[in-house]
Amino acid sequence: MASAQEQSNFANASVSIKFYDKTMYHPGDADLNPVFIHVTVRNNGADTLRFKLADDRMFSIDFNAYTIKNSRLAQTETLIRKRTTNQTVYFREIALETGEEYSFVENLKEYLTVPTPSVYYLELTFYPELYRSRNTRLTSNRLTLEVRPSPSAASSSSIPVQADTATILQPEEIPPDKVVEQTIIARQKSLWDQYFLYMDVESLLERTPSAKRKYRAVSADERERMINEYKADLMQARIDGDIVAIPERFQIERTVYSRTEGTVVVTEWFNNRTFYERKSYTYRLRLREGIWQIYDYTVVNLGTE
């Protein structure tokens, strides 16, 4: 048990949670359908509050979720493995003055397995002296998490509009090679709505660690702004020039895919007036709610001709 002194140190501290960017939640993958929770630690007392916060938040917090029948969701294998492996835990000491708060965002699905649709009651436990000293803890408010059945491809919510007809564009259940083919053709014709139709823009934005950290640290409104700016930068060819380069012609060389992951290798020719530059693109795709999306790519120069 925690000592009376330890408990008194945090008697005037509180931890609260709320949904970071509440959306439609479905069972399954932590990356494809995350449940981001905004966590806030607050000093409600007159004295300075000091606590430890692990760089890997799994050593500072726990999520607990229960069904209506009080059945508890299981922890993920990743969390269990980290907790049971002998390793050094790096942390910072945070100091909050009266009325000050410290917030961060975590993905619930990295902590708990969400296997089925249901209504869950969610709360968080914060360990101000880290998980290994977990007798000292703070418990948050409770949220109601509604997890709905995964939608079929027909109910996809993507709604870019085709300018010439005002028809709402929706992604179709087509194989990875057709996704890549349609995306390249859309770029050749500068049809941006069609170009982004099968793009996982968020994953492309997060390709570098620094961009990923920045994106996940900001508010929902700021994240939307970052995505819009990223799209605008792509359209102006200010960043990631390879993905928006316009080939004069292309040829799909190889397509390999499993139930959820795929790669499409394409040779693309770029006209540089006096010669052609030839490049090999490897597009990486994954299946999300029945639709294949491009989430990463690599490029290899093949020389000129």
Image (spheres, rainbow, N blue to C red):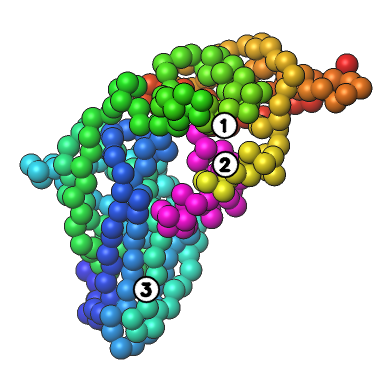
Left or right relative to 166: residue 242: right
The residue depicted at 32 percent of the width and 33 percent of the height is 28
The disc labelled 1 sits on which kind of residue?
Trp
Frontmost of labels 2 and 1 is 1
Alpha carbon distance from label 2 to label 3? 33 Å
The disc labelled 3 sits on which kind of residue?
Glu
Frontmost of labels 2 and 3 is 2
Discs 2, 3 touching: Cβ within 8 Å: no
The prevailing secondary structure element of the residues shown in magenta is helix
Dot 1, how many residues are within 10 Å of its Cα: few (below 14), some (14-19), or many (20+)? some
Decide which of 239, 150 is in the foreground and name it. 239
In the image, residue 233 above or below residue 99: above
In the image, residue 48 above or below residue 174: below
Please tell me the numbered disc located at residue 231: 2
The residue depicted at 37 percent of the width and 73 percent of the height is 101
Q: Secondary structure at mark 1?
A: helix
Q: Is residue 263 magenta?
A: no
Dot 2, how many residues are within 10 Å of its Cα: few (below 14), some (14-19), or many (20+)? some
Discs 2, 1 touching: Cβ within 8 Å: yes
Alpha carbon distance from label 2 to label 1? 9 Å
Alpha carbon distance from label 1 to label 3? 42 Å
Decide which of 69, 78 is in the foreground and name it. 69
Please tell me the numbered disc located at residue 133: none
- What residue is pinned by disc 3? 101
In magenta, the rendered stretch is 200-226
Left or right relative to 277: residue 223: left
- What residue is pinned by disc 1? 192
Frontmost of labels 1 and 3 is 1
The disc labelled 2 sits on which kind of residue?
Lys
